[in-house]
Amino acid sequence: NAGVTQTPKFQVLKTGQSMTLQCAQDMNHEYMSWYRQDPGMGLRLIHYSVGAGITDQGEVPNGYNVSRSTTEDFPLRLLSAAPSQTSVYFCASSYRPGVGANVLTFGAGSRLTVL
Amino acid sequence: GQNIDQPTEMTATEGAIVQINCTYQTSGFNGLFWYQQHAGEAPTFLSYNVLDGLEEKGRFSSFLSRSKGYSYLLLKELQMKDSASYLCAVVDSNYQLIWGAGTKLIIKP
């Protein structure tokens, strides 16, 4: 049981390049989400999905795209990287959001630097 | 706007007790979580409160007062491995998690 697997762990991009952060979970979770974590700030929600084929924007969606073609996978695409997207990114999943103690399981994180 | 406030950093001594406070102002309330995050690692779940009162889990306890918009995490018998950041998060009326910036806890021998 791997939980939530994120790749890559580290990535350096040049401004304007595009890339995809991969996220996969093997817990049959309906809910998946992407957060970014910046120093001195709380985790901020980028995009989320409540099931295959359904995605929605979070607090800071600009510059990012997602898709959910299967229950297991939820990739995050940076369309044209900017230095402001330098951050640590976490993928997280759970059974159903907002239902009781719906605990999020996080991936190990991806540290992205945009030069 | 929505706001979660936690102290930025706290220092405590091994074997002692520490209380980390969290105050919140959110659009609605559907529960409050505490997560632990060691440096360079992912957050992991510690506790959940939805009703007023104290929830105890071994050395860790979490308290909630909804009328005051206030919670605290109490850590007893501190160990060096408790050095970490502690994140408070509130579930708002849209069932989204609103996160505080976290409290970095430093344990000294």
Image (cartoon, coloured by chain):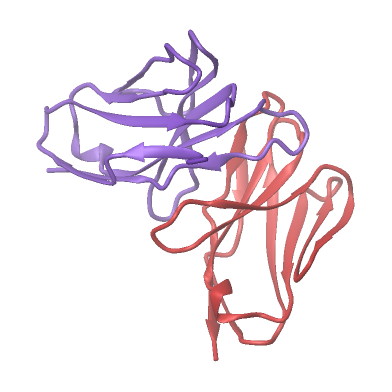
| Position above or below: B79 against B24 | below
Residue B85's spot in the image, x, y percent? 53, 63
Q: Residue at position x 41%, y 29% from top? A: A60
Q: Quadrant of residue A68?
A: top left
Can you name the residue that lies furthest to the front here?
A1
Residue B38's spot in the image, x, y percent? 48, 63
Chain appearing in red on the rendered image: B
Tell me if A16 is positioned left or right of A9 in this view: left
Q: Quadrant of residue A62?
A: top left
Q: Which of A2 and A113 is in front in this view?
A: A2
Counting labels gives 0
Q: Residue at position x 39%, y 15% from top? A: A67
Q: Which of B46 and B105 is in front in this view?
A: B46
Q: Residue at position x 50%, y 36% from top? A: A92
Q: Residue at position x 67%, y 23% from top? A: B94
Tell me if B73 is positioned left or right of B11 in this view: right
Residue B53's spot in the image, x, y percent? 90, 54
| Position above or below: A74 against A88 | above
Q: Quadrant of residue A97?
A: top right
Tell me if B79 is positioned left or right of B69 in this view: left
| Position above or below: A34 against B67 | above
- What hue represents chain A? purple
Can you name the residue that lies furthest to the bottom here?
B109
Residue A106's spot in the image, x, y percent? 50, 42
| Position above or below: B85 against B51 | below
Can you name the residue that lies furthest to the top here?
A53
Which quarter of the image is occupied by the C terminus of chain A?
A: top left
Q: Which of A48 and A8 is in front in this view?
A: A8
Tell me if B107 is positioned left or right of B61 in this view: left
